[in-house]
Image (cartoon, rainbow, N blue to C red):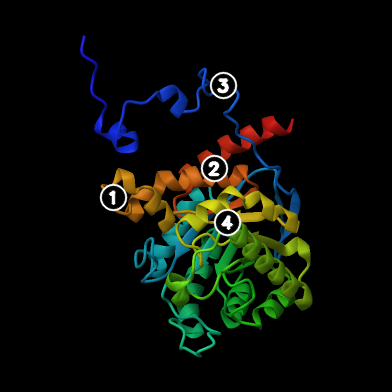
Amino acid sequence: MRRAKPSRLRRRFTGYPCHWEGFFGVSTPNTLGKVRMSAQPRIVAPWRLRTRTLELGRRTLVMGVVNITPDSFSDGGKYLHPQAAVAHALALVDEGAHLLDLGAESTRPGSQVVGHPRNLVPAVSSDEEQARLLPVLEGIRKACPDIPISVDTYKAATARAALSAGAEIVNDVSGFLWDPQLAKVCAQAQCGVVLMHTRGRPDEWRSQPILEPDTLLATVRSGLQASLERANEAGIVAESIVLDPGYGFGKRFGENTSLLARQAELLTLSRPLLAGLSRKSFLGHLLEPLHEGNIATVAARENAGLAALVVAILHGASVVRVHTVRPAVEAALITDAILDQQNE
């Protein structure tokens, strides 16, 4: 009897027929005792927001993204009109989002930001950012007043206006680096903050040298520590702060996978972690073998994003930031159940 030829997909990965049992992690004589999946305990702590407190660490919170931009890498232009953005936000809440994150300026690679040493004009002024953001924020607050809202901005003026309009959290991709007044605004409002690590500025990302894993982790850890120190100097209490490793923000391709593999080491900073991996370009590059050697489109990265989300939770993330909420909520529920069993 002739042996069947391996499928095209199987040949693409190995070139030869393979033992699926070992590939998928089922114990065989050669793999017995070698397959391990360990999870890192998360930090259980209160997250103090402007008017309320959330408990982090016992279950994963899912933050739904609403991009009010014409040029976001993932869905630019779809929700630029306030009515469309509000409707999308409410749909995310219906799908199970615990928080919303509103952004009105894209910080994609190549964009210009405030605080640049060459004094470039930012791609979006504070006035324009607020004109996009505030009608959506007010619309969501009117329709769903109980959902905590985060604003994704590094500008003090925009943060001040959004907090006055009812936002609970400021999500700063620069970690209080690009606008030195932002930390003071957050301290005065006593709001929650997300401090992300960003290596360089968007117009520098494509030309930065790739770092070795140990150097990258040390760079991220020291950058986040510096952000914590800036927050402390401004008078922000530790209970208000969540840290974000900043996947894709000045990290190129394989740097993101090495950072995700060692994300749990950032828990030594003693603050809960947020992970934003949804639709990132490094996922598209990892999927190239399934797309004839081409980077996977944004739409084709959803399943990969879920896989990365599960890894992030197992490696200590308390909050995950996503574009598609319902599958993320389901994945988080299953992952949390596994964590509960391991922690018993």
Q: Residue at x 72, y 34 (%)?
A: 343
* Residue type at tag 3: Leu
Residue carrying label 1: 293
Q: Quadrant of the N terminus?
A: top left
Mark 4–mark 3 Cα distance, whole angstroms, equals 29 Å
Mark earlier in primary sequence (4, 2): 4
- Classed neighbour count for the residue bearing mark 3: other residues with Cα under 10 Å, few (<14), some (14–19), many (≥20): few
Q: Residue at x 26, y 29 (%)?
A: 7
Q: Is residue 81 left or right of residue 141?
A: left
Residue carrying label 3: 32
Instruction: Count every numbered label the image shows and give the total.
Output: 4
Residue carrying label 2: 310
Residue carrying label 4: 213
Q: Residue at x 47, y 52 (%)?
A: 92
Q: Nearer the viewer, mark 4 or mark 1?
A: 4
Question: In the rendered structure, are the residues bearing label 3 and label 2 in contact, judged by CB atoms less than 8 Å apart?
Answer: no
Image-quadrant location for residue 78: bottom left
Q: Name the residue at the top extreme.
A: 1
Question: In the rendered structure, are the residues bearing label 1 and label 2 in contact, judged by CB atoms less than 8 Å apart?
Answer: no
- In x, y percent, where is residue 18? 36, 26
- Classed neighbour count for the residue bearing mark 2: other residues with Cα under 10 Å, few (<14), some (14–19), many (≥20): some
